[in-house]
Image: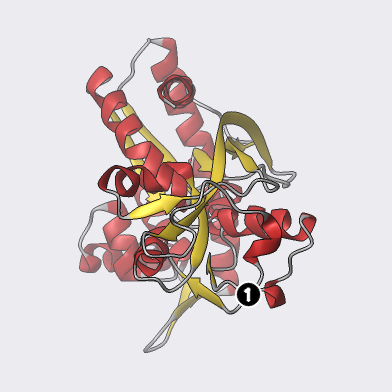
Amino acid sequence: MTINQLEVFCAVAARRSFSLAAKAVNLSQPAVSLQVQSLEEHYGTRLFDRSVNSISLTPMGEILYQHARNILSIWEQADREIRDHIGSMEGEVMVGASTTVGQYVLPRVIGNFQRKFPLAVVRLQVKNTAEIIRLLTENILDLGLLEASVDNKKLACDALTTDRIVLIIGTEHPWAGREYVVAAELRGEPLILREPGSGTRRVVERALRDANLRMEDFGRVMELGSTEAIKTAVESGLGIAFVSQWAVRKELQLGSLKVIPVRDLLIERSFCVAYPRQKFKSRMAEEFVSFAKKQV
């Protein structure tokens, strides 16, 4: 049994998919299957139950998965501590980001970071906030950059920067020529929201409740799975939406969308950096966080 075999096994177990695991570990699917088969032969038992459409861990597989994650975490910690001790900035850091941060903030930060540290590799996963928290608690990620503070005992959270949520409308909307609106005027307007689990959605819903606005007060509520889809819908005149100020910089420059202040509704939030409490944070991970704070 080798570290590589455990890494492959954990990749399959975490994703419940040989094909997705193969992409994650940069191996072919047959090679991944062979590694898992070698482990099963080593223990003389099946580690996965395989069906046509899905796979799942057997009871023996569950036992190995629990211990293998701990083994890999300890091995990674030893590797990073040694690299930190000799001052090397070579290696990789696994970063997860919720959608707004991952799409509109981090690409420039990562590019600048890797120009400064050519031997550093930043691997980024962009998912909604709930999914990033799950990956952090399973120790799959080193860091998570999120759109809201985290209430999870397994995770620590540090502030990164402040974000403002703004109301966007299409250029043909009746409010397009106005300087501002008040919250009461939002009643009856069609509202476009991100999907449940989105950090942006949570902060918007909380602010609307504080302003005595319920979902039933809007003309209709549409849910879309990405900020890009929301912006396109607003440009097409399908409704109004609240999005991060980071997400509409290009559209404001092009004049395809308009931000209109809501005089009695200020929505701000803190972007934060979350990381597992029980996982060693390498010097490179700390350097990346410090670098990101200066860039944003």
Q: Is residue 169 above or below residue 59?
A: above
Q: Is residue 114 above or below residue 34?
A: above
The residue that appears at 44% across and 25% down in the rendered structure is 80
Please indicate, yes or no, whether residue 296 appears anywhere in the rendered image: yes
The residue that appears at 56% across and 40% down in the rendered structure is 164
Under mark 1, the amino acid is Gly
- In the picture, measured across the screen, residue 159 lies left or right of residue 194, that is right
Quadrant showing the C terminus: top left
Q: In the current view of this chain or complex, which residue is farthest to the top?
A: 86
- In the picture, measured across the screen, residue 119 lies left or right of residue 142, that is left
Which SS class for mark 1?
loop
Q: In the current view of this chain or complex, which residue is farthest to the bottom?
A: 52
Color style of the picture: secondary structure
Please indicate, yes or no, whether residue 45 appears anywhere in the rendered image: no
Q: In the current view of this chain or complex, which residue is farthest to the front?
A: 177
10 Å crowding of disc 1: few (<14), some (14-19), many (20+) = few
For the residue pair 201 and 236, the one nearer the viewer reads as 236
For the residue pair 230 and 87, the one nearer the viewer reads as 230
For the residue pair 120 and 3, the one nearer the viewer reads as 120
Where residue 81 appears, x then y in whole percent? Answer: 47, 20
The residue that appears at 44% across and 56% down in the rendered structure is 176
For the residue pair 266 and 175, the one nearer the viewer reads as 175
How many numbered marks are there? Answer: 1
Residue corresponding to mark 1: 188
- In the picture, measured across the screen, residue 226 lies left or right of residue 165, that is left
Where residue 291 appears, x then y in whole percent? Answer: 42, 21
